[in-house]
């Protein structure tokens, strides 16, 4: 029964919710709690922790009541490609700017799909680069390098 619970995606989610909620209670225990009128620094983590533990218990009950399919095997190529894309974009952003970093991120993330199409990659990269420039540099006035060598 426990083995079935641990293989069930709902059971895994329940364990995750309960662990994160317990961490919130643990890290919020030494902070002043306060009251509803004057919330202390510990109010939010403790309340969220209790809420997450409650949600975790409800999900655990669902996992015990209904049997679900086992989790499918993860797509390691997609996981690695998406992670690498984000890391490389973060590393490139400060050194060469968004004109190089965002298309590099899109191209690497496209490797997570089976056969990426060049037109889709170019369209997505140019659209995201323009949107990043319009929102963060033009709209918000952030000092992000556009193109540097």
Image: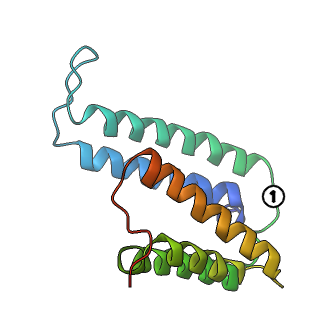
Res 142 seen here: yes
Q: Tell me: residue 8, above or below residue 99.
A: above
Residue at image location 60% in from the left, 76% down from the top:
103
Where residue 100 sits: x, y (%)? Answer: 52, 78
> Would you say residue 3 is visible in this rendering?
no
Q: How many numbered marks appear? A: 1
Which of the two residues, 141 or 69, is positioned nearer the viewer here? 141
* Residue 72 point in image, percent of width and height: 77, 73
| Relative horizontal placement of residue 38, taking residue 145 as reference (left or right) | left
Residue at x 48%, y 81% (from the top left corner): 88
Question: Which one is in front, 132 or 55?
Answer: 132
Quarter-wise, where is residue 58 in the image?
top right
Residue 102, image x, y percentages: 55, 72
Residue at 68%, 54% in the rendered image: 10
Q: Secondary structure at mark 1?
A: loop
Classify the position of the C terminus by image quarter.
Answer: bottom left
Q: On the image, numbered disc 1 is attached to which residue?
A: 68
Query: What colour scheme has been applied to the protein in the rendered image?
Result: rainbow
Q: Nearer the viewer, residue 38 or 59?
A: 38
> How many residues crowd around disc 1 within 10 Å: few (fewer than 14), some, or many (20 or more)?
some
Q: Position of residue 34 (x, y in %)?
A: 19, 24
The quarter in which the N terminus is drawn is bottom right
């Amino acid at each position: 029964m426990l083995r079935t619970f641990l293989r069930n995606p709902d059971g895994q989610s329940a364990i995750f919710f309960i662990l994160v909620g317990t961490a919130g209670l643990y890290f919020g225990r030494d902070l002043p709690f306060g009251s509803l009128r004057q919330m202390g620094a510990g109010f939010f983590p403790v309340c969220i922790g209790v809420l997450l533990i409650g949600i975790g218990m409800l999900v655990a009950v669902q996992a015990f009541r209904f049997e679900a399919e086992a989790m499918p095997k993860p797509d390691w190529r997609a996981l690695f490609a998406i992670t690498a894309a984000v890391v490389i974009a973060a590393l490139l952003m400060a050194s060469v700017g968004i004109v190089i970093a965002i298309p590099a991120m899109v191209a690497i993330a496209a490797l997570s799909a089976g056969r990426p199409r060049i037109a889709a990659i170019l369209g997505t990269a140019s659209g995201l680069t323009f949107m990043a420039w319009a929102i963060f540099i033009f709209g918000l006035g952030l000092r992000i390098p556009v193109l540097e060598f």
